[in-house]
C-alpha cells in the first residue's frame, strides 16, 4: 500500500466500509472461525434474536447452528425446537454432539400457538436457545423483546423474500448453498458496516460412492472405496 | 411457653367474603323458618342492616344482598385448613373453639428471626389467605385467647405482666355460661380485674370451680394443656364463590386463596405436590375436574397459579361455577433448598421445569417431548419420544441427518438415479441396512447421501426388494 494512503487510513476520522464497531455482546461461538470473526461479540448473540433467511427450508441452516447448540446443551438449560418442519432425528443430533437430554420439541397446532410457545420459552430464562420457524407475518419484535428479557438465544428461520423488509432482529443472515458449501451474507449486525460474503464448509460428506446402478454406468461411476483403517494392535496391559 | 392466638372475628362472614376481591353487601344468616341476620359486612351496614334483623327485612333494604346461611361444619373444616397452613410456623397448633387458632411460637422465634418478623409474616400470609385476624401473644394460651377475642394485637411476654393486662377485659370474653356473666354484671362486676379482686372462696361457692379454674389457667396458676392438631395426609379445601361465575379471573382469585393455604400445608409437611386436582362445582352439572401435573414436586404458589391460569384458559365450562374444591392428589417429600453463600449462576431445578409445565398446560402433555436414540439400525425405529431431560447418550453414530421424513417420501427416478426436482447426485454410500426380519417390519435398503444441484444434501435409500424404488429418508439440513 502507498505509504501516504496508509497514513490517511490510519487517521481515526476516516471510516472504512468494512469496519464495524466491536460491541460487547454476550455471545456463543458459532463453531466457524470465519463467521465468528464477522460477528460482533464473536458468535451468535445471546439475549437477542437472530434471523436466518433462506430461499427454501432445510438447505443447511440448521447445521450452521448445531455447533453452538452442542455447546449450549452441555449447560443445564433447555434447547427448544418450536414446531420444527420435520421430525428431528435423534441419532443425527447426537452424532453432531448435541446432548439430547436438554433438547425439547414443542408441537403446535397453529402459528399463534407457535408464537406463544416461542415467546414463552425465550422469556422464561430457562431456555438457552429457542429455534422457531417463522411465517410471513411473525411479530419478530415480541420475540426480540422476549429474548432480551430471558437472555436466551432466539433463532428464527425465515424466507429470503423478507430480507428487504426491516426487522427488529439485531442479527440477520441470508444463507444459500453453492456446490455443497454454505454461502452467508450478513444483512444486518450490531455495530453496522458491510460484511463480506462468507463461504463455509459445513462438513458435507465427500466420501466416494461405489455403486452399481446399471452395468453400463457401472464402469463410469465406480470409484474405489476408502481404504479401511488398518487394524491397530493394542499392546497387552493397555487394553 | 409463648402462645399466639389468631382470632378470626366474624369467621362465618369472612368465609363468605374471602373468595372475591370486591365485597358485595353480604350477610350471614341463621337457618330456620324465620332466619335472622347473624353478621353483616360494612357494605350491608350502609343499607341500614344490623345483626339480629330478620332476613326478609334486610332484603327489603338491599335487594342485591348476598346471603349465606351459617354452616358450622364448613367453618370447622375451613379452620382446619387454616391450621394446616399454620403448621409451617410451629409444630404445636391447636384449634380454639370455632374461630381461633393457638400457636405455640417460642420454639420458632429463632427460625423466624424474632417475634416481630414472625408476627409480620403471619399477618402478611393471613392477608394472602383472605383472612383478617387479631393476633395476640401471651405466655398462656387462655390469656392469648382472651386478648385476641378482645381484638387486641398485643404482645405480653412476661407472666407477671399478665394480670394487669387482663384486668381491663370485659367478663363476656370468658367461656362461662351466660347467666354467670349476667349475675356478675348485676353485682357490678364487669371486668376480669374486678372479678379477680373478689374473695376466691366466695366466688367458688357462688359460681362454681369452673370460673376460678378458667381465671387461674389464664394467669398461669393452673396447667393448661392443649391438644396439638395433626395435619391430615392430604389437603382438601372448599371455597364457595359469592356469586356463580363463568370467567377465569374470579376463579383464579378464589383458587389463589386455597393455593396459598395449600403452600403452607405443604411447607408444614415438607412436601411438594406432583398432581393437583381442582374441582369446579356447578349447580346443575357434574363438577368440571382440572388436573395439574408437575414434573418435580412443587410448593411455590406462584408457579401453581401460573400453571392453573394456562390450564383454565383451555377449559370449557358447561355452566357457571358455584364453588371450587382444591385437593392435593399426589404429594412427594420435598426438602427446603439451602441458600448458597455466593450468588449462583445455576438454575434451580424447579425453575427449569416451570417452562415445560407451562407449555404442557396449554398445548397438552404429549405436545412437549424430548427425543432419544434407540439402538436399532432402521431409521424409523432408531429414535423414541421421551420425557424431557431423561434422554441418555448412546454410542456414537454414523453420519445421520437432522430431519427425518415420516414416512419416507417416494422419489421418481431417472436412469437409475433419484430425482427431487432435479436429478440428485450420490455423494456417499451405499450403506446397507438389512434388519428387522424377526418382527415383521424388515427392511432391505441401500442408503446414500445425495445432493441436488444447489448442494443441499439428503439421505436417500433404494429399496433392495420389489421395484427397487428410491425414497427420501432424511434431510441433513
Image (tube, rainbow, N blue to C red):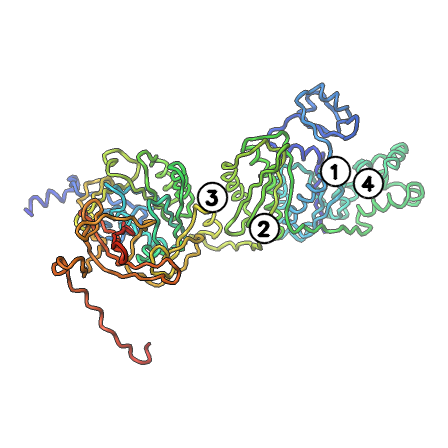
- According to the picture, the residue beneath numbered tag 2 turns out to be B330
Q: Which mark is residue B175?
A: 4
Quote the CA–CA distance across marks 1 and 2.
29 Å
Question: Which one is closest to the eye, mark 4 or mark 1?
Answer: 1
Rendered location of residue B330, percent (x, y): 58, 50
Mark closest to the chain's N terminus, 4 or 2: 4
At label 4, counting other C-alpha atoms closer than 10 Å, the crowd grade (few under 14, some 14-19, many 20 or more) is few
Badge 4 and badge 2 in a common chain: yes
Which residue is label 1 attached to? B72
Specify which label sits upstream in the sequence, 1 or 2.
Answer: 1
The mark that comes first in sequence, 3 or 1, is: 1
The residue identified by callout 3 is B364
Q: Distance between the residues labelled 4 and 2?
A: 41 Å
Between marks 3 and 1 in the image, the one whose residue lies nearer the viewer: 3
Q: Distance between the residues labelled 3 and 1?
A: 41 Å
Mark 3 vs 2: CB contact within 8 A: no
Asked if the residue at tag 2 contacts the one at tag 4, i.e. Cβ–Cβ closer than 8 Å, the answer is no
Amino acid at each position: 500500500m502507498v505509504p501516504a494512503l496508509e497514513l490517511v487510513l490510519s487517521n481515526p476520522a476516516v471510516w472504512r466500509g468494512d469496519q464495524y464497531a466491536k460491541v460487547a455482546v454476550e455471545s456463543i461461538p458459532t463453531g466457524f472461525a470465519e463467521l465468528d470473526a464477522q460477528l460482533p461479540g464473536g458468535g451468535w448473540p445471546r439475549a437477542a434474536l437472530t434471523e436466518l433467511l433462506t430461499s427454501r427450508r432445510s438447505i443447511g441452516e440448521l447445521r450452521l447452528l448445531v455447533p453452538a447448540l452442542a455447546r449450549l446443551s452441555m449447560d443445564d438449560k433447555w434447547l427448544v425446537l418450536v414446531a420444527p418442519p420435520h421430525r428431528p432425528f435423534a441419532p443425527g443430533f447426537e452424532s453432531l454432539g448435541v446432548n439430547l437430554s436438554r433438547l425439547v420439541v414443542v408441537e403446535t397446532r397453529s402459528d399463534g400457538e407457535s408464537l406463544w410457545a416461542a415467546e414463552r420459552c425465550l422469556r422464561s430464562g430457562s431456555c438457552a436457545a429457542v429455534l422457531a420457524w417463522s411465517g410471513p407475518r411473525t411479530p419478530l419484535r415480541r420475540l426480540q423483546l422476549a429474548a432480551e428479557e430471558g437472555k436466551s438465544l432466539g433463532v428464527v428461520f425465515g424466507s429470503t423474500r423478507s430480507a428487504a423488509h426491516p426487522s427488529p432482529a439485531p442479527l440477520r443472515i441470508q444463507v444459500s448453498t453453492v456446490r455443497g458449501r454454505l454461502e452467508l451474507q450478513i444483512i444486518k449486525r450490531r455495530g453496522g458496516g458491510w460484511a463480506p460474503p462468507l463461504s463455509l464448509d459445513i462438513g458435507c460428506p465427500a466420501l466416494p460412492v461405489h455403486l452399481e446402478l446399471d452395468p453400463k454406468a457401472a464402469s463410469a461411476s465406480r470409484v474405489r472405496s476408502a481404504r479401511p483403517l488398518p487394524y491397530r494392535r493394542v499392546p497387552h496391559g493397555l487394553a | 411457653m409463648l402462645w399466639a392466638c389468631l382470632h378470626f372475628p366474624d369467621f362465618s362472614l369472612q368465609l363468605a367474603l374471602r373468595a372475591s376481591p370486591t365485597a358485595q353487601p353480604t350477610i350471614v344468616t341463621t337457618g330456620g323458618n324465620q332466619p335472622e341476620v347473624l353478621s353483616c359486612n360494612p357494605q350491608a351496614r350502609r343499607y341500614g342492616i344490623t345483626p339480629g334483623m330478620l332476613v326478609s327485612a334486610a332484603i327489603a333494604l338491599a335487594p342485591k344482598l348476598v346471603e349465606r346461611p351459617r354452616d358450622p361444619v364448613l367453618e370447622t373444616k375451613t379452620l382446619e385448613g387454616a391450621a394446616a397452613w399454620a403448621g409451617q410456623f410451629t409444630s404445636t397448633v391447636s384449634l380454639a373453639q370455632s374461630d381461633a387458632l393457638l400457636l405455640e411460637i417460642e420454639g420458632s422465634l429463632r427460625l423466624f428471626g424474632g417475634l416481630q418478623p414472625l408476627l409480620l409474616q403471619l399477618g402478611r400470609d393471613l392477608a394472602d389467605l383472605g383472612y383478617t385476624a387479631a393476633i395476640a401473644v401471651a405466655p398462656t394460651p387462655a390469656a392469648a385467647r382472651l386478648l385476641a377475642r378482645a381484638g387486641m394485637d398485643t404482645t405480653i411476654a412476661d407472666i407477671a405482666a399478665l394480670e394487669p393486662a387482663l384486668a381491663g377485659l370485659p367478663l363476656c370474653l370468658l367461656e362461662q355460661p351466660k347467666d354467670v356473666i349476667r349475675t356478675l354484671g348485676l353485682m357490678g362486676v364487669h371486668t376480669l380485674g374486678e372479678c379477680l379482686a373478689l374473695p376466691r372462696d366466695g366466688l367458688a361457692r357462688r359460681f362454681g370451680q369452673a370460673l376460678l379454674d378458667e381465671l387461674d389457667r389464664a394467669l398461669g396458676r393452673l396447667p393448661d394443656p392443649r391438644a396439638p392438631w395433626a395435619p391430615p395426609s392430604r389437603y382438601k379445601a372448599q371455597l364457595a364463590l359469592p356469586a356463580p361465575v363463568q370467567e377465569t379471573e374470579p376463579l383464579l382469585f378464589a383458587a389463589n386463596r386455597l393455593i396459598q393455604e395449600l403452600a403452607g400445608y405443604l411447607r408444614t409437611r415438607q412436601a411438594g405436590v406432583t398432581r393437583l386436582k381442582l374441582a369446579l362445582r356447578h349447580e346443575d352439572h357434574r363438577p368440571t375436574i382440572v388436573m395439574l401435573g408437575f414434573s418435580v414436586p412443587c410448593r411455590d404458589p406462584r408457579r401453581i397459579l401460573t400453571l392453573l391460569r394456562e390450564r383454565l384458559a383451555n377449559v370449557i365450562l358447561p355452566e357457571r361455577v358455584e364453588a371450587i374444591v382444591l385437593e392435593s392428589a399426589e404429594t412427594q417429600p420435598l426438602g427446603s433448598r439451602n441458600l448458597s453463600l455466593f450468588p449462583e449462576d445455576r438454575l434451580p431445578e424447579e425453575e427449569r421445569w416451570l417452562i415445560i409445565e407451562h407449555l404442557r398446560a396449554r398445548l397438552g402433555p404429549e405436545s412437549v417431548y424430548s427425543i432419544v436414540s434407540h439402538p436399532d439400525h432402521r431409521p424409523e425405529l432408531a429414535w423414541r419420544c421421551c420425557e424431557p431431560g431423561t434422554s441418555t447418550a448412546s454410542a456414537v453414530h454414523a453420519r445421520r441427518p437432522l430431519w427425518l421424513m415420516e414416512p419416507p417420501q417416494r422419489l421418481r427416478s431417472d436412469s437409475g438415479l433419484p430425482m427431487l426436482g432435479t436429478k440428485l447426485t450420490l455423494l456417499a454410500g451405499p450403506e446397507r441396512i438389512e434388519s428387522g426380519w424377526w418382527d415383521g417390519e424388515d427392511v432391505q435398503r441401500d442408503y446414500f447421501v445425495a445432493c441436488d444441484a444447489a448442494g443441499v444434501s439428503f439421505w436417500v435409500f433404494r429399496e433392495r426388494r420389489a421395484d427397487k424404488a428410491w425414497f427420501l429418508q432424511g434431510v441433513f439440513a
